Image: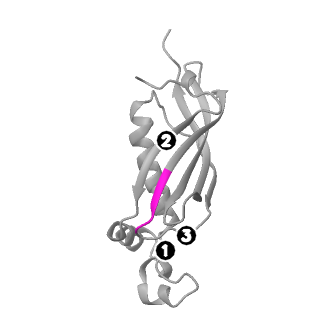
Amino acid sequence: MTIYFEDLTPGRSFDLGMVRIDEAEMLEFAGRFDPQWYHVDRERAETSSWGGLIASGWFTASLCMRIYVDEVLSQAAADTSPGLEELRWLAAVRAGDTLRGVLTVIDALESSRGPDLGTAVLRWEMIRVDPKPDQVVLRMQGRGWFHRRPH
């Protein structure tokens, strides 16, 4: 079943599934894209207030995008996105953590791009379920353009 703009009603939520933070992937990403010491220098991170390595927020956001594509966009009549209005890293993420993604439709608006599209205002959350349950670690809010259901 294809998800069209009309299906993206305010308040609707999508379970994006779970992702476990793999240390090798976390370190590879940080080494390539965000090599700040608390992401890549184990010894320094362990003696810091962080008490160990933490994932790059961009890594966590990338994982969120991956499960969003897998669970929603791959089934949607999606166009593109004009961008994010909010991106917040609310808690440190570590190797071994298990996160659950949730997408919530905040609003559904007319699109300035034309009558065949609608604009969905969306909120993504990554919620730690293990080892500290129900802790939101990432929140993003942005917009996506979706095609309207054909007449």
User: Looking at the picture, which amino acid does disc 3 mark?
Assistant: Ala
- From the image, give the main secondary structure of the stretch colored magenta: strand
Residue under pointer 1: 54
Q: Nearer the viewer, mark 3 or mark 2?
A: 2
Task: Tell me residue 149's x, y (percent).
Answer: 50, 17
Q: Do the residues labelled 1 and 3 touch (CB within 8 Å)?
A: yes
At x 44%, y 36%, the residue is: 73
Q: Residue drawn 54% across and 19% down? A: 116
Q: Where is residue 27 in the image (x, y as percent from the top left)?
A: 37, 72
Q: Mark 3 points at which residue?
A: 92
Residue flagged by tag 2: what amino acid is it? Asp
What element does badge 1 sit on? Answer: loop
Q: In this view, does 45 lie above or below 115?
A: below
The residue stretch that appears in magenta: 96-100
Q: Any mark on residue 133, and which?
A: none
Kind of element beneath mark 3: loop
> What is the secondary structure assignment of the residue under circle 2?
strand
Q: Mark 2 points at which residue?
A: 15
| Relative to 90, 68 lies left or right | left
Residue 29 vertical placement versus 64 (above, below)? below
Q: Earlier in the sequence, mark 1 or mark 2?
A: 2
- Expressed as whole percent of the image width and height from the top left, the position of residue 55 reads 47, 70
Examine the structure image and report whether residue 123 is included in the region drawn in magenta.
no
The kind of residue tagged 1 is Ile
Q: Of the two numbered discs 3 and 2 on the same chain, state the one appearing first in sequence.
A: 2
Viewer-proximal residue among 112 and 123:
123
Name which residue lies at 47% across and 26% down: 3
